Structures are given as structure tokens and as C-alpha cells.
Amino acid sequence: MIILLAILTPFLAATFIPALYKRFPSRHIGWFVMLVPLALFILLASFVPSIAGGAKYTYEFKWIDSAGINITTYLDGLSMIFGLLITGVGSLVILYSIYYLSERESLGRFYVYLLMFMGAMLGVVFSDNLMVLYVFWELTSISSFFLIAFWYHRKQSRYGAKKSLLITVSGGVAMLAGFLILHALTGSFSIREITSTIGQYTDDKLFVYAMILVLIGAFTKSAQFPFHIWLPDAMEAPTPVSAYLHSATMVKAGIYLVARCTPLFGGEALWFYLVSGVGLFTLFWGALNAVRQTDLKALLAYSTISQLGLIMSLLGIGSAALQEIGQVNTFIFTGAAFAGLFHLINHSTFKGALFMVVGIVDHELGTRDIRRLGGLIAFMPLTFTISVIGSFSMAGLPPFNGFLSKELFFESVANLIDSNVFSIGAWGTVFPVIAWVASVFTFIYCMIIVFKTFMGKPKSERIDQGAHEPPLGMHIAPLILSALVLGIFFFPNLVGSYLLKPAMASIYPMFEGVEGLVPHISVWHGFKLPLLMTIGVVVLGTVLYLTLPRWKWVFSLGPMRWNLDALYNGILMKSEKTSHLVTSKYMTGHLRDYFAYIFLFFIIVIGGGLYWIGGFPFDFSDDAPITLNEYIIVASMAIAAIFILFAKSRTTAILLNGVLGYSIAILFVVLRAPDLALTQIVVETVTTVLFLVCFYFLPDWKKETASKPTKFINALIAILVGTIVTVFALVVQGNPLFDSISVYFEDAYNLANGLNIVNTILGDFRAFDTMLEVVVLFIAGIGVFTLIKLKSGKGEKDIED
Amino acid sequence: MKINDVILRTVTRIVVFIILTFGVELFLSGHNEPGGGFIGGLVLSSAFVLLYLVHDLEWVQKGIPFDFKKIAALGVLLAVGSGIGSVLFGGNFLEQATGVFTLPVFGETSLYSVSIFEAGVALTVVGVVVTIILSISEDV
Amino acid sequence: METLITILIGVLVTVAVYLLLSRNLIRVILGSAILSHAIHLLIMTMGGLKKGDAPLLGENSNSYTDALPQALILTAIVISFAVTAFLLVLAYRIYKETGTDNLNELRGFNDE
């Protein structure tokens, strides 16, 4: 229950922001916003001891019970880690935003989106039901879209937002398909239930498709190759957003999904190869591309891609443990998942700090281009210190937490060499090699961040003039994060036993409580392979960093020019062009043509259908008798209707329409419908008044100027439609397929205490319809009112194209 | 639109009251006889429309100082709220209840919770119809 | 009776469709109003006509006409009134903004 409230709290808070912001349009509104994640963080943290003790909390709120879709919240070790990240980093990011964003920005909008994202993200990690998870998953994509396009007047922002939305949402749809397959297989939407029964279905041929589709969802969200291209463009978002969504939380939703699905799909060779292979290649590709970036944020984006790849590959390796149940080498693989989770936490700390540092540099100097930066150490010593801590941790150097997880990572890939898992054979050696090479590049770009920005000579005049430390408030958040970077290095096992242990139990439910699942993290474990690898990285990395200008030509080689962005743009352009071409063929802009399409479709389908069944089984035997006055009414109506077509003036036409309306009212009397007759009379009166009032302002109608052939076609369509409606109605009347359900309503007095059946239907039996009808009426009223009163201003002018 | 027609004006003043009474009667009798929220609301609004047509806008607005948009909104709130109300009493959404009470003057009287719903419908209809006609005629 | 009304419906639909295909905005709105008249009659006819007394239980009759179509039509009448009103005001606003009520001149922008 409390977890459900935790998910809803950000949404609720978001609804208050606009009103609050209207009254206090100041940056200090951020303090109120910050309370939300801070309170949730404390709340979640209070669960940590019991979760570490193996407790799990579930709460079910019935939603669409008949379809098996219920809002089930599930708090276990894995969701705990993510929950703490979301709320913890969230608080820090909001604190940072208070100082980062100027008061001229529309802060209300910003915080609404941010809170919406926070709630959605909490929903993703705490949902047990796949459908609910999917809804929240897409909601994170949407809020990310809004946040990237926060400065929507910039073309690049809109481009980046659209790109991220297109890629992540199409991935999400693939994931939805995967979920539906899982549901078709197991008959359940609950992850826990599916996990417990999936064993029987692993041989089904649909199982593989489910796996691949779910993975596409995870890969697009976590920016894995080849879907990573959206992340660099997403850097158009304000820096706090990049720090929060695009490094610490949203992009880790894919990781979460993979970790959560490990008990489902783990142990399959395909899963192992896909996750670890894609992850490893992404690690390498991201690191390589990061080196050549000149924009600090783009560099961080590629480094995020690369680090996500690292975590992904570790989870992939970790999944192998599920295949080898009972064998000795199981813990080699669980160790990999452990390292992955550990690095996940570490990455959020150091990358968050680095993003905030870049934000500070950007904020103070107005540029993030490393070609124009340099020598900042003299002006911003504190910022420099934070960036050293962050970068060196990312590079995997002691005494920072990145060192520990990097060592574990090396150990895990090195273990693959002679494990021969899934008959990997000699390929097992490829893993550590790629990992090592990628780490060399990681080292290089980490050095670029620190040394190109802060060392050397100041290159821009602006630095000489006004560079100085930002307000202290901007430093608080990154300082807390860097303190964590150091703290985790010195007390890693605190994290290990309180956060990672229960999370490991969620990934490996069958090993829960088994000794050795949670390794002891030690800073020093002798001159073994991992440490040697790290030393190698540092040595080669330093050499390559110093000689960077001499081998930069590598980036202009063939494979480096593979441009996925061009592919994406090309496909988008092509599809836009084609659809424009096709659409402009039939979307003529003439209302008449659209009506003609509708009626022609009607004629072809209904008329064709009638012709096809043939026979026209009319049956007039049940007809009621007709009296003379009824003949007169009907005849006068028909005549009035036809005369409308030939009316010379619109007033005549409207009066003839009135004749129709009042005659129908009389017909209603004849046909025993007093309520309808009353309503019809009044409505007809008011409508006629309305027409006349409008005519006062509108020009008189001119004679139809359409050409003879058009008129002929129109008449033909009209006559055909009229005939088909008549014939169809006659056929239906003669051949009722079902008994009338109206007998039920004749019991109205007992059921609803009313004598007027029509009224009881409106007020009791079908009150929901009536309520919505009233709402529609109200909306129409508002529409009329605004149409008349609204004098629209022209839209904002400062939008680039 | 100024129409100087004494007879029409005088007649209207009387007729409007007849129509209003008729509208209320239709609204109240709806549960058992022909009538109800929609019809009652429509008849009431036609009375207002008649007033606006015969007299000028300012004249009527002095006499009936309501904002009809707010009346429409109130009606929707009432209709939806009566549905939520039944949830608060443990029923289903929009479930209606009836009670027979003995009141001092009226004797035995049936009270329907559906009347609240119908009142919401009627108010919405009055509000919307009058708003529509008014906003067009105002915009000269 | 049903057959007669159904033929009337056919006439009304024909007129309405012809008006809808016109290029004058007022004619289109008039067409939609007539079309809704026709449809109300159609719903009514589908429930059978004059099969009993008015659906008021106070009449103490043996049989009543089908009340369900009547309830549906009551809803439809009010909604079609709202739609007609909205369309009229739309036409009025369009005329004020663009100075025309000819649909051939109202084709939006080509680049959208």
C-alpha cells in the first residue's frame, strides 16, 4: 500500500506545481519539489534493513481484474536499489536545478515533467504486473521527450526529443509484444507468477520471440548498440535532466528489465550471447566514440552508452549461472551479476557528479567545447576536484568506487576464458580482450575530461575575464555524490550486504540464502589477472592519451564512418516523403470529397453486402396499420424534405426544416413517445432560433455553382445511399435475429421505483450514458463559447525551423 | 436588437412564467410521467431564450444575474457528484436510491436520489443552451 | 407503418446526403440536421411501431412500446442539437475570419 502511494506521490505533487508556481514564480519552488523525492528516499531507506533481511512487500490493487491486469506493487532487493537511485539522485538533481536553471525559464513546466518522470520510473521498478510496467515504461519515454524538448524553440532539442521518442517507444512496443507472448504462453501478467511457471515453456518456439522482443525494449531504453544513437542527441536537454534521466535512471530501466527477466530467460544460450555480446560491443563502441567527441556532454553521453554496455554484458554473463545449477562454477557467473549491480550504483554516483560538473562549466563559461576550454583549475578548484574524483572513478582507479567494480568486471570476463559455458570455446578469450581494449579507451576519455578542461592554458577570453566558482548551492549535489564515490570505496561491503545481497536474491531466486552468492568485496586481492589488467590499462592509456593527436586518423577509417544517424535520418526522410506523396493524392482538402469517400465506402460495403447475400427477404407481415392522418404527415414530410433541395433562400430552407422537425414531433406522439415529442418540439424551436440568429450574421446562400457532372454524381450518391438505407432497414425489420431486451425495462417500478420507463432508463439503468452525454453537451457549450470569444494571438515567434 | 412592441413584451412576461412553471413541473414529474431532466431543462431554457429575444440583453441580465456557464458547470458537477455520492455510501457508481418519507405538510412523499442526478442534467441543459444563444447574440 | 416510415427515412437520407455533398457550409449543416432526424426515425422504427401503449407504467396497460429506442433517441436529440449548434457557430466564426462560406475556398494550407 505504502509503495503504491510512493508511486502516486510524485504525480499528485505534479498537479499542485502549476498552481503553486503561479503564486510563487520563483526558483525556490524547487525546494518544495525536492521534498517529494527526499521524503520518498527516507521512506524507502527505512525499508532497507528488513529488505536486507530477506523481506519482500507486495500489495495488490484490483484494476482490470477480469483481464488479469492489476496494479501490484512489489518491493524487493532489486527494485529497492532502483527506488533509492531514483529518489536519491532525484533529490540531488532537483537541488542542483534550483541553482542551475534561471528564473526566466518556465520552472513550473520543468518540475511537472520531472515529477511525472519520477513517478513513472518508480512505477516501472515497483510494478509486478507486466502491463502496468509497460504503461509506466512508456510514460518515462514521454516525460523524457518533454524534458529533452524543454527548450523547444531550439531545432536541435526538438530533433533530439523526437529521435529519443521514436526509438524508445518503438522499442517499448516491441517489448509489449514480448509481454503479450509471455501472457499467451503462461496465462499471467505477473512477473513472479511467470517466473515460477516459465520452466515448462522454454521449448515453445514463441519463447525465443518473447525473449528477443523484450530485449529490444531493454536495448532501446538502455541505449545499446545499434539503438544508442538517440542518447547523444538527448543531451540537448538541460544538464540536470541529462544527469538524472540520461545517465542515472531512465536509461537504466533497460538494465532493470534485463535483471528482472534473468530468472525468466537466463540459462538460455541466446539470452547469454545477446545480452553479453551486445553489451560488450556497446561498451567498446561507446568508449571508442567518446574519445573523439569535442563536446563535453556528448563525450559523457557516449561514455554513458559504454558504461551501460558494461553493466549489460555483466548481467548477460551472470545469466549463465542459471544454466549450471549445482555445478562448482556457478558463483563465477553470479559474481558477474553482482559486479553489474555494484557498477550500476557506482556509475550513478560518479556519472551524476560528472554531469553536474559539466553543467557547472557550461553555466559559468557558456561553452562545453573542450577545444575552447582549458586551465580552469586556477578558477574552479572545487569543481576540478569533483571532476577528478568522478573521472578517475570512471577510469577504474583507486581509491574510488569505480576501481572496485572494474576489478570485479575484469575478474568476471577473465573467468570466461576457460569456463566453456554454452560451448563458448576459444571465443571466451575474446571477451576479456574486448573488455580490456574498451577500458583503455575509457581511461583515455576520462583523462580528456579532466586534463583538457582544467589543465593547460586558458583558450577563451571569457575564461580570463569572468571564470569563477558557481554559487555554493550548485556544488552541494556533486559533492555529496563524490563523497559517495569515496565512501563506497572504503566501505563497499556495507553496500554489498544491505543493497546488493537482497537484489542478488531477486535475480537468482533459486539461490537465495546460498553461501557465496554475495562475494566479499576487497580492495586488495593480490597481483592477480584483474589488477594486472588495470595496470595495463593505465600504462597503455597514458601513452595513447599523450600521443592522441598522432593516431586520431583512426577515426576517419572506414568502419568509424558507419553512420547510424544518417541511416535513421534517411529512413525518416524517406518515410515522410512517401507518406506525404501518398496522402496528398487523396487528401484534396475538399470536404465534399471526404464525404464522398465515406458514402462511397458505405455504398460499396453495405450495398455490396446486400447484393452478395441477395434475395432481399422482406417481411411486412408484422407492420402496424396506418391511418389516414399518418399518411398525411409522412407525405408532407417527404415533400418538405424534397423542397429543401430547391429552396431559393435559406430562410425557406430553415422553415422547411422546421416543418420536418415538428412533423417528427407529431409522429412521436402518434408512435406513443410523449417524452420524445416534448423534447423534439423544444429542441426544434431552439434550433430554429439558433439558425435564424446565425443567419443574421452569415451571407445569404448563393445558387449551387457546381458543374453539371458533379451535381449528377452527388445526386447519384445521395439516391444510392438513401435506397441502401431503406432496403437495409427493411431487411433488418423483417428478420430479427435476437429477442428484444426491452422487456427487462418494463419492470422499472420494481427495479428503479419509476413509472416512466424512458426516464428510468436515462436516470437509473443507463445513467452512465446520460452522465457522459451531459458532459458532451457541456463540452459543446464550452466549444461554442470559446469559438466566439477567443480572439487568438499569433503563436510564439522565436521558434527556429 | 431593440423591438418596440408593447404587446409582445407584456405577453412575454406572463408567458415566461407559465413556461417556467411548466418546465419545473415537467422536471419534477419526470420519474413517473412524461418529463425529466432533459425536457425540463430545455423548456426552462426556451423561456430564457424567449426573454432574451423579446427584451435586450442588458435588461435581462439585470433581472437574472446568473452566469449560465457556471450553471452548466454546476450541473455537470452535480450529475457526476451524485454518482460519486453513491460510491461514498457503499453503492456502485451512479447507483440510485429511493426512500418514502412522511413529511408534515405533504404527507407521504417519495424522495429519489435520481432527482439530484436529473437536476444536474437539467442545470447543464439550461446552462449550455442559454450560453450558446447568448454568446452568439452578444457577439455583434 | 414500418415500411412507410422506412421509405420516408430513405427520402430524408437522400436529401441529407445531397446537402452534405454541397459546397455551401450552411447547406452542409442543414444536411447534418436532416440526417439526424432520419436516424432518430430509423432507431424508432427498429424497435417496432405502435406495439403497445406509451411506456408509462401508470397507464396500467397490457403492453408497452419499446422504451429503449426512445431513451436512445432522447439522448441523440440533445446531442445532435449540441452538434448543430457547434457547427453553426463554427460556420459563423469561419465566415468572420475568412469572409467566405464556400468550402472550396476553405482548404487549409498546402504545406501541412
Image (cartoon, helix red, strand yellow):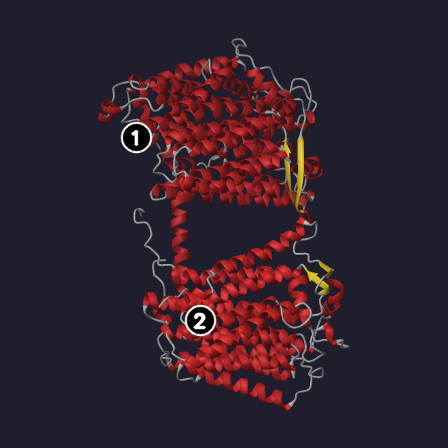
Q: Is residue A146 left or right of residue A552?
A: right
The residue located at (53%, 40%) in the rendering is A12
Instruction: From the top left corner, tell me how far across and down residue B117 is, in percent.
Output: 62, 60
Query: Which amino acid does the dot numbered 2 rest on?
Result: Tyr
Residue C25 can be seen, yes or no:
no
Q: Chain of mark 1?
A: A
Disc 1 is placed on an element classified as loop
**Label for residue A367?**
1
Furthest residue to the top? A526
The residue located at (36%, 78%) in the rendering is A700
Query: Which amino acid does the dot numbered 1 rest on?
Result: Thr
Q: Which residue has dot 2 on it?
A: B52
Image vertical order of residue A248 relative to residue A657, above or below: above
The residue located at (63%, 45%) in the rendering is A181
**Label for residue A23?**
none
Instruction: From the top left corner, tell me how far across and down residue A92 is, in percent.
Output: 46, 27
**Marks 2 and 1, how far apart in space?**
65 Å
Q: Quadrant of the N terminus of chain A?
A: top right
Q: Is residue B133 left or right of residue B30?
A: left
Nearer mark to the viewer, of 2 and 1? 2
Image vertical order of residue A471 relative to residue A117, above or below: above
Image vertical order of residue A53 relative to residue A66, above or below: above
- The foreground one among A794 and A493 is A794
- The foreground one among A335 and A86 is A86
